[in-house]
Image (cartoon, rainbow, N blue to C red):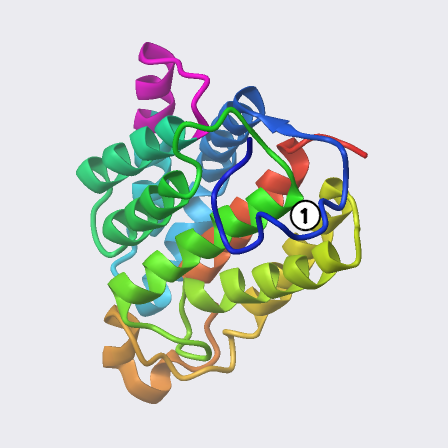
Amino acid sequence: MGCSGAYSGAALGSLMMIKAGDVLSWIKGLQAVFAENRQYLTELDAAIGDADHGTNMDRGFTQVVRALENNPSEDIGAILKTAAMVLIKTVGGAAGPLYGTFFLRAGAACGGKEEMDSADIVAMLEAGLEGVVQRGKAGLNDKTMVDALTAGLNRMKHLMTEGVGIKEMLKQGAAAAHQGMKDTIPMLAKKGRASYLGERSIGHQDPGATSSYLLMETMAEYFGSD
């Protein structure tokens, strides 16, 4: 059985199933990606935030990987819930509650499950995004992580209905998230610390949208192959 969600009865898109080991590999990949992009994310955040996004994401996912190594599980929901709890406890600023909520809701959509198909992945990401929207009270074009996540998820939902395989679905979803990230540059920030800058926030790429794109790009890299 896969994750529960609105898309559990939709076209599978691929017979390939994503296992708990793939999810663990993705999270370990995120730790490496955020370590590599620590300075880049911090520089983006320095322009419109508290200059700590890169440091926070690096520290948080380092602790997540450590916790998962100490408590291995074949339950995808449990893996994501562990990640959520660690992020909430260790990541400062808005990123901790927002990413913590993302992983908590994603985990709830996959509770007790050991594998996912393409519909499950979409349901997992949609649950995570809904949690972020509810927690952060942000919508499209508010210059936040919601812009990148929504662009990626919408593309994946479209491709899933066409029966596209998981790897291609995720690859194109990541490309759409990248565009959603770039689209934040000319936006006026309406939420978070950046909103305090008013029009001075225009012309800067949102760091949260950037880390969200990296999350989806890394998922595309680690979640199987067609």
Q: Residues within 10 Å of mark 1 (few under 14, many from 20)?
A: many
Q: Is residue 65 magenta?
A: yes
Image height check: is 20 above or below 51? Answer: above
Image check: 11 left or right of 39? right
Q: Describe residue 86's horizontal placement relative to residue 122 as left or right.
A: left
**Front position in the image: 191 or 48:** 191
Q: Is residue 206 visible?
A: no
For residue 177, above or below residue 65: below
Residue 97 x/y as whole percent = 24, 51
Q: Nearer the viewer, residue 226 or 53?
A: 226
Residue drawn where x is 50% and y is 74% of the image: 184
Does the magenta stretch mainly form a helix, a strand or a loop?
helix
Classify residue 156 by image quadrant: bottom right
Please, is residue 138 above or below residue 108 in the view?
below
Residue extent of the magenta highlight? 63-76
Q: Residue at x 71, y 44 (%)?
A: 12
Query: Which amino acid type corresponds to the residue marked 1 in the rendered image?
Result: Leu
Q: Residue at x 30, y 49 (%)?
A: 101
Label 1: state its secondary structure: helix
* Residue 194 appears in the rendering: yes
Q: Residue at x 62, y 47 (%)?
A: 119
Q: Residue furthest front?
A: 9
What residue is pinned by disc 1? 170
Q: Position of residue 147 (x, y in %)?
A: 49, 69
Q: Position of residue 7 (x, y in %)?
A: 58, 53
Position of the N terminus by quadrant = top right
Q: Position of residue 123 (x, y in %)?
A: 52, 50
Left or right: where 111 falls relative to 170: left
